[in-house]
Image (spheres, helix red, strand yellow):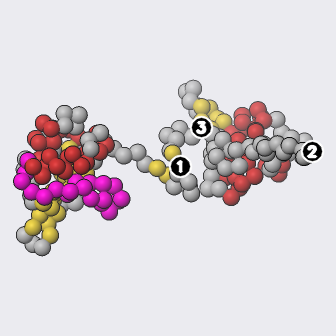
Amino acid sequence: MAEKLEAVKVLYCGVCSLPAEYCEFGQDFEKCKPWLIENAPEVYPHLIPKDADGNEVDKVTEKLQGAGIASGSAVLTTSKEGTSTGKEEVKRLPGGKVKKKDKKEVIIEKVVRNKRKCVTIVKGLDLFGVKLNDASKKLGKKFASGASVVKGPTEKEQVDVQGDISYDIVEFITDTWPEVPESAIYFIEDGRKVPAA
């Protein structure tokens, strides 16, 4: 009878989520090094610090050398090699790209085309849980114009409404969708973001 094969157990890095053998090819190898020394020393034996006799240096002394205490206060600072840098942890997408959190705000912009025709663009309604198809229908009926959901230049969906409706749209949005506060609505005027309130 044939022998049953067991599944290969792969150790994944806790920092970059690549297999430990492939961490050196990732974007954050410098950040991965402390994790690899602690959890997978057999994969990268050359990363383990050695003293003059060739013995491994105690992990505690290594961490203490990277830490310092500011004079007169109890603030503990760590070096670049330490894991706590004081900055917020940012979510990384595959390929090392940083994912930014979207601010919950509605941006209204008036774009002039063909010298006389205007299009009012409403961005960010979906961040408040508003369905954009319903929003375009309600905006089209309220202002008696064409309205549609379009992908903008940033690949995010937005509502395009024909005509200059910026004079009345803030009141309509806050009345129709109470979850959208007036303080979160902004106009784009001359390339600057101006609060609607």
* Residue 68 quadrant: top right
In the image: residue 167, left or right of residue 5: left
How far is mark 1 from mark 3, CA to CA? 17 Å
Residue that numbered label 1 is attached to: 92
The amino acid on which the numbered mark 1 sits, given as a three-letter code, is: Arg
Q: Which mark is residue 1?
A: 2
* Mark 3 / mark 2, whichever is N-terminal: 2
Residue 39 in the image, given as x and y percentages of width and height = 76, 39
- Specify start and end residues of the magenta stretch as a single range: 142-160
Residue 115 in the image, given as x and y percentages of width and height = 9, 72
Residue at left offset 9%, top offset 53%: 165
Between label 3 and label 2, give the one nearer the viewer.
2
Residue 4 in the image, given as x and y percentages of width and height = 86, 43
In the image: residue 147, left or right of residue 77: left
* Mark 1 / mark 2, whichever is N-terminal: 2
Q: Nearer the viewer, residue 175 or 101?
A: 175
Residue at left offset 56%, top offset 30%: 75
Residue at left offset 74%, top offset 43%: 11
How busy is the neighbourhood of tag 3: few (under 14 within 10 Å), some, or many (20 plus)? few
Verify CB contact (< 8 Å) between mark 1 and mark 2. Answer: no
The amino acid on which the numbered mark 2 sits, given as a three-letter code, is: Met
* Residue 14 quadrant: top right
Q: Secondary structure at mark 1?
A: strand
In the image: residue 90, left or right of residue 109: right
Q: Secondary structure at mark 2?
A: loop
Verify CB contact (< 8 Å) between mark 3 and mark 2. Answer: no
Residue that numbered label 3 is attached to: 84
Quarter of the N terminus within the rendering? top right
Between label 1 and label 2, give the one nearer the viewer.
2
